[in-house]
Image (tube, helix red, strand yellow):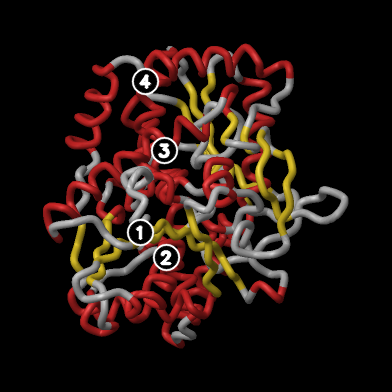
Amino acid sequence: MTTKGYYGNWGGAFIPEVLHETFKQLNLAFEQAKGDPTFWQEYKELMSTYSCRPTPLTCADNLSDHFGGGRIYIKREDLNHTGAHKANNVMGQGLLVKRMGKKRVIAETGAGQHGVATATMAAKFGLACTIYMGEEDVMRQRPNVFWMEKMGATVVPVTSGSKTLKDAINEAFRDWVSSMDDTHYVMGTVCGPHPFPEMVAWFQSIIGLEARKQIINGFGKLPARVYACVGGGSNAMGIFQGFMDDKDVELVGVEAGGHGLESGEHAARLAGIDSSAGVAQGYKTMFLQNDDGQMRDTHSVAAGLDYVGVSPILTDLWEKGRVRFESATDKEVMAALDLTMKKEGIIPALESSHAFVQAFKEAGDLATDQALIINMSGRGDKDIFTIAHAFNDPSWKEFIRKKGEEYATD
């Protein structure tokens, strides 16, 4: 990272004057925490006793035999508390909130996993909590909304724009401007103004630090490739950091190809051809935008990848050629999910399944004495309605219709 939160040409902190003092306080608290060895130890202890870390690295023998070639290992963030990698970041930020003495947290969420994790953290630390979530995501991720509310969080459906993650972030920032004295914004991914990209990446690095030790202990050497899905990019940055200095380990990020890159209905910023450099939501990166700089609508079967921008850290790594970016279509994702369930009895989240797609395409290219790691960023429980609909399961159609009527009348 260069000065003032830039990663090469990307990043920065483009914030209104009213937030400058709040960001100054946040930067100071974060720098002090990074420089305090007892803070990281407290964080690791919390994640060990409350959040099931370290999560295991599972050798997928059946999938490995199915494809031939390299051995497939799966980093099981689905077994982390709340079912995804999101707890790593929010618990770390929760400890910072305690240091800063604030009493309320707000957050945005797409797939709902960050919202659930934030609501969990707020319940544990005794904080008031408000979650902003696009109206479309509220409907397709109803189970997560239920749990957020049951843990005491207020969930605010956002009806502006495309009614998805981008719009939820905008509303969260509007809240923060008017409540910054007692409120901390728990950014869910490695995006936004500095120090959020660096902060979230730091907390998520626990994934890669674990995975590197585990693959050496279990396989005897480093993997040839590491795959991760990329929305904002927090799970990818989490696992990539464990191998960033290992130049023989190829890092592969997989974005949402939606209905195909040629359709325009996707969320591929770095693997596609429709993005360009821009400044929005407090930072500079590659965005899906038109010639006038207006953000375009995005599409993905996975709510957590349905975002118009991408981490400035990943954009820098892409520009430097350190991370290769690919995309996976909705149809490919459903096929990879189906195969994983039937071969391994493991149910990846729709987001994570994007990484499985690319790994499956390339596993056969590796020798039998090589390995690859797929970062399974979360589990698919939250996606049951979307998955059932995509598989065209008739037994679920009537159930979902009835539930939709119940939600409409509540």
- Whole-number angstrom distance, CA of label 4 to CA of label 3: 25 Å
In this figure, which residue is indicated by the disc labeled 4? 34
- Whole-number angstrom distance, CA of label 4 to CA of label 2: 31 Å
Q: Quadrant of residue 263?
A: bottom right
Taking the spot 46% from the left edge, 44% from the top edge, the residue there is 115
- The answer, for residue 278, to whether it is visible in the render is yes
Taking the spot 71% from the left edge, 16% from the top edge, the residue there is 18
Circle 3: residue type? Ala
Secondary structure at numbered mark 3: helix
In this figure, which residue is indicated by the disc labeled 1? 226
In this figure, which residue is indicated by the disc labeled 2? 355
Taking the spot 56% from the left edge, 55% from the top edge, the residue there is 138
Q: Position of residue 220 (x, y in %)?
A: 13, 58
335 or 208: nearer the viewer = 208
Of callouts 2 and 3, the N-terminal one: 3
**Image side of residue 166 versus residue 122, left or right:** right
- Whole-number angstrom distance, CA of label 4 to CA of label 1: 27 Å
Front disc: 2 or 3? 2
Q: Position of residue 217 (x, y in %)?
A: 12, 53
Graded by Cα atoms within 10 Å as few (under 14), some (14 to 19) or many (20 or more), the crowding at tag 3 reads many
Q: Quadrant of residue 305?
A: bottom right
Front disc: 1 or 3? 1
Q: Position of residue 251 (x, y in %)?
A: 41, 56
Secondary structure at numbered mark 2: helix
**Image side of residue 335 versus residue 339, left or right:** right
- Whole-number angstrom distance, CA of label 2 to CA of label 3: 27 Å
Circle 4: residue type? Lys
- In the rendered view, would you say 266 is above or below 146? below
Residue 119 — which label? 3
Of callouts 4 and 2, the N-terminal one: 4
Front disc: 1 or 2? 1
Circle 2: residue type? Ala
